[in-house]
Image (tube, rainbow, N blue to C red):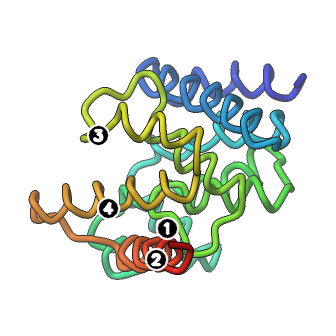
Amino acid sequence: MKNLEKYQKKLQNYIGKDRYQHTIGVMYTAAALAMAYHYDVDKAMLAGLLHDCAKNIPHEKKLELCKKNHIEVTDVEQANPFLLHAKVGALIAKKKYDVDDEEILHAIAVHTTGAPEMGTLDMILFIADYIEPGRDKALNLPAIREMAFQNMEHAVEKILYDTLNYLNQKSGRIDPITEYTYEYYKNRRNLVV
C-alpha cells in the first residue's frame, strides 16, 4: 500500500485532474470487485491506479514506444493510436512504476479490448473501467453495475456487446480482438445454458 500512495502522487501530476478522478474511481471500483470475488485487493487497486498511465502520451510517441519495444500494433491501432494506451500502459507500469507482476501488467494491457479467457484481475479491471462511479453515459450502466457483482463473465459479455453496438452505430473502426472476445464470452454463456 505504500507504493500505492507514492504512485498516486506521481500519477496525479502526470495524467491531469479529470483523468485522475476517473483513475481513482476505477481503483476503488476494482477494490470492491476484488472483495466481492475474493481476489487480492492490493493488486486490483494497483491495476486500477495504473490502467491509464499512458493515456496522455502523444499518439506518435505511443507508436514509437511500440516499435522500440516490439509491441504488436494492429491495423486498427495504427489508424487509431489512442487505443494503444492499454498496451503502452503495461510497458510504462513495468518501466516507470517498477511493476513486475504479470497479472497486473496483462490486466492493464487488455483493459480496453478485453481478451478471450481473461483471468479474474483482467475482468475486474475491464469492468471497473466501464462502471466506475464517474461514468454516466454508457447504455445499460445500472444493469451492468448490478451484473458486475453477480457474474463477471456476463458483465464482460454485456459490456462488449454494448461497446460493439455503439461503435457500429458510430461507424467507428472496431479492433478485431474486441469482436473475438465478445464471441468468446457469448459462446461460453451459450455452453453454460
Identify residue for label 3.
140
How far apart marks 2 and 3 lie (CA) works out to 21 Å
Identify residue for label 2.
190
Which is more N-terminal, label 3 or label 2?
Answer: 3
Q: Indicate the quadrant where residue 65 lies.
A: bottom right
Q: In what element is the residue under mark 4?
A: helix
Q: Please name which of the two marks, 1 or 4, marks the residue nearer to the observer.
A: 4
Nearer to us in this view, 64 or 157: 157
Q: In what element is the residue under mark 1?
A: helix
Q: Indicate the quadrant where residue 140 lies.
A: top left
Q: Which residue is drawn at 47% across and 44% down?
A: 55
How far apart marks 1 and 4 lie (CA) works out to 32 Å
Identify residue for label 1.
64
Identify residue for label 4.
161
Quadrant in which the N terminus appears: top right
Q: Which residue is drawn at 56% across and 74% down?
A: 192
